[in-house]
Image (tube, rainbow, N blue to C red):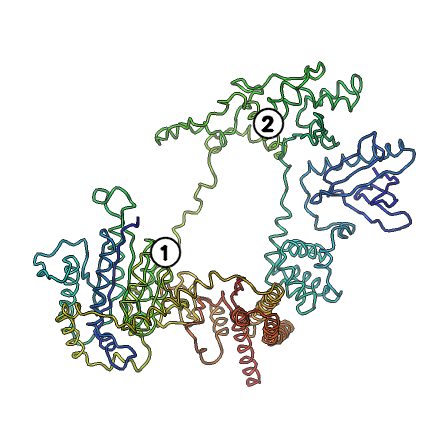
Amino acid sequence: MEKASHLSVIVDLSPTQWHLSAQPSNPYPLSIQSFLSQLLAFLNTHVAAKHENTLAVYGALPGKSVLLYSSSDPAPENAPASDANAFTPFKLVDATVVDRIMQEFEAVSEAEEEAPCSLVSALAKALCYINRITHPSTSAGPEDPNELPDPRILILSVSPDLSSSYIPIMNCIFSAQKLKVTIDVCKVYGPETVFLQQAAHLTEGSYIHLERRDALLQYLVMSFLAPPSVRGVLAVPRQERIDFRAACFCHKNIVDIGFVCSVCLSIFCQPVPVCSTCRTKFPIKTLQRLNASRPPGPPRQATPQTSPAKPSTNGHRGFGPELNGRP
Amino acid sequence: MPCSAKASYKKLPGTLELNGTHIQWTQDGKKAPAVRVPHASFFSLFCSKDGSPQVRLKLALVNDDTGHNFTFISTPQSMALAERETFKTELTNIIAKNRSAPQQTPQPAAPPSHIKLPTNSGPITAASSTPGTPASFAPAASRAASVSSDGRTPIIPGTDAASDFRLRKRVLLANTELASLHRELVMTGQITEAEFWEGREHLLLAESSSTSQKRGRPGTLVDPRPQAIEGGEVKIIITPQLVTDIFEEFPVVQKAYAEVVPKKLNETEFWRRYFQSKLFHAHRASIRSSATQHVVKEDPIFDKYLEKDDDEIEPRRARDEIHDLYINLGATNEDHEETGNTKDFTMQAGRQRGALPLIRKFNEHSERLLNSTLGDGPAKKKRKTDDDDEYRRIELEDLNDFEASSGIVLEMQDRQRYFEGRGSGANGNADGDDPAKAVDIRHVFAEARKSTVDWSSRFSQLKVEKKAGDAAFQTMTQNVATRLKSKGQKNDLPPTLFASMRTCQTAANEFLRQFWTSMYPPIALPGLSNGALTTAADQQNRAAKAAKMAGYLGKTHEKVASLVEIAKREGADVSRVEVAMKPMLDAVDHATTFWSARQAKGTKAR
């Protein structure tokens, strides 16, 4: 019998990006209205898949992140009017999620300009939530550790990479690895995001970039409904090529060739005399040597999809990967 | 010590000689010995029975059980026997010496006779190690010399060229892939020996340190096993080696031998009766001997020496008092009372009484083995008498924290910037024409507010278009199917083609390695002079090497093209060959682009 599974969904609710996504100039425009409907259907599917399944929904809004719904919350006082066409638990999830989104949009719209979307903060909250439910205090939790749900996170992203959030996102990834939480990523709109690709790869989740955005629900159900424990049997689509590049600490640019501080492992896009993170001073000779070894002329035009990052100048020098016997 | 005799080897008549360092056999009428084995590789000795028509002697070597068979052909046979006896005694001594003294390390300053390798050590060594021309060996030797003189990589232990060469050969023999690469590149003269080993010094170091390790005595118990059983007859082959081993392991047999042979029994009779006696069965290292107890005959001579089974509660041989607190587990007993661990009663040695003699025998054997390694030198005694400070003896050095350092504290400056980081590129998208900028924010917020209105009626009408759904389904299935296909795919390239692909790939990798090591670290910088490193000659050498490697790399595309050609001819999947070689070609292209860019810059500078 399958274990119960916990799903934390992080919804990227950047009004600007959703506005852009709905533009008819896109190949397959997707408005937030249509997105919400398909998302609700997916949430209901997860809840329906097994009685013990639990759910948490986070919204990543401009400048803040909120918990939109959690199945462990007590039912609200003013329960929505029952609907002959809807199963009440589903209706409860749907109504709570949409009402909260509405409230948050009301609150945000006071602002003069849109702050960057706090996806990382939502991710961190989701991880904390999962940590709490997988490590219950001894009195509250079930006796058998096998009864604890199998946790995973699904990120529905529309915003581009925020390179300033590189460090926090990497920290989130490491915590997820430690908690054995799978992070799945569905890139609904916008360019590929390097960091989320890495997040999915490092936690053995799958990263999907939508091609037919009008069929979002199809993607959600096929790729993200199966919990990780089932994926050994039921193959789900995955990203084949992953961009492993990192963002430098100094200018927050995503770099092809980085220079790594030998003390604190900070990454810089150019050789620096003093590490800005730990104030380690580097010998002038090293600087000269590193500068001399940088590629001549203008930086080589990178092809992000095919060339993995070279995190340090010492390791890779462009050797081809070993032929592993299976061409 | 030196002795010689007429003996045949592989049915050819000749002379067998034993001198101070080697045993050698020379065919009649030839000058050079056909077999020449140094003492150190003698492992064991077998002789034919005294009554047999041929007087044979077999010498097994370390790492070579087949060894060499010699037949003594002097007439009359008694003379052959006598000659063999001489050889036997000498060889037994040498073998005993080999076994007791753990393998000596090859001495760096070996006399010239040692450097010459035994001619019979196999054709592989000759193929992989002997440089094709003296010319290609010369740079290797000079390189070795320069290494030891400038002191940059001083730890290569064989300072002279010969032992350096032997070391390299051993590394190549142990690593077939490296050997084939070596054959491919160095034997054909594309890369010199010195270039090949540059950057691989660690392999040599590892090899030299592993060979210089002391090998201890083999720890097997002496347990002669019957070889053939015909009609109840048990046959045990007694080699001189076995006799020595038995005497060492069971002193009581040696005592019996000394007292009985040759007065009461001759040697053959002695061993025959010993192996039938209760004494022998008591000495066997297994409980199964008790089953044969009843078939063993009474033997008035050997039964005298029989000892009572060592299965009393106290072992017969009183255990040495453990003086060393360090290994006496009971000594620190009082420290562990409060930890609350109950004692482990599940394992009681000798609950089964029959096993007790065996357990004790094993223990004694282990003790003997350890003592022989330790040597009964003064070290042991010194430890015992040195009991001034009991505490110091139970102190574990590893547990002492000599340098209580708190590590390097990472003091991040300006944390705010890192964790909330609104750096210059905070908006992520460095492109100037960010579409997000061109959006009227008020309008967008209004749109967002409206988006949730009347959600439930829209939700009830949710419908995924069939066409879109099918397309999505197709792409996802394809994604999974590709992975499944590559997982289930067999490697069905023709083996020869696959082998040449691998060769091409490893060769190109080696060229790349050589190319980049001649590029980095750059030496053309002033102020970076690392002693002898940046002499003009050195620079020229590096430039020449880089040019050479770039030349080789330039040909890689041709090589791959020819591989593809072969694949076409052999009916293999051409695209798979191309895909397999692609990463390597990318790396090669990167290197060649780099090289031509540098060349262009160099000419401009001039």
Viewer-nearest residue: B500 or B529: B500
Q: Kindly identify which residue carries mark 1.
A: B409
Q: Give the x, y percent position of residue B327.
A: 50, 31
Callout 2 and callout 1 share a chain:
yes
Residue A305, quarter of picture:
bottom left
Q: Amino acid at mark 1?
A: Val
Q: Give the x, y percent position of residue B93.
A: 76, 34
What residue is at 92 percent from the left and 35 percent from the top? B75
Viewer-nearest residue: B217 or B338: B217
Viewer-nearest residue: B58 or B366: B58
Outermost residue on the front side: it is B466
Q: Is residue A326 left or right of residue B264?
A: left
How many residues crowd around disc 1 within 10 Å: few (fewer than 14), some, or many (20 or more)? few
How many residues crowd around disc 2 within 10 Å: few (fewer than 14), some, or many (20 or more)? some
What residue is at 37 percent from the left and 31 percent from the top? B341
Q: From where the camera sits, is residue A175 visible? A: no
- Can you tell which mark lies on residue B286? 2
Q: Is residue A151 left or right of residue B300?
A: left
Distance Cα–Cα, label 2 vs label 1: 61 Å
Q: Give the x, y percent position of residue B592.
A: 55, 77
Q: Give the x, y percent position of residue B246.
A: 69, 28
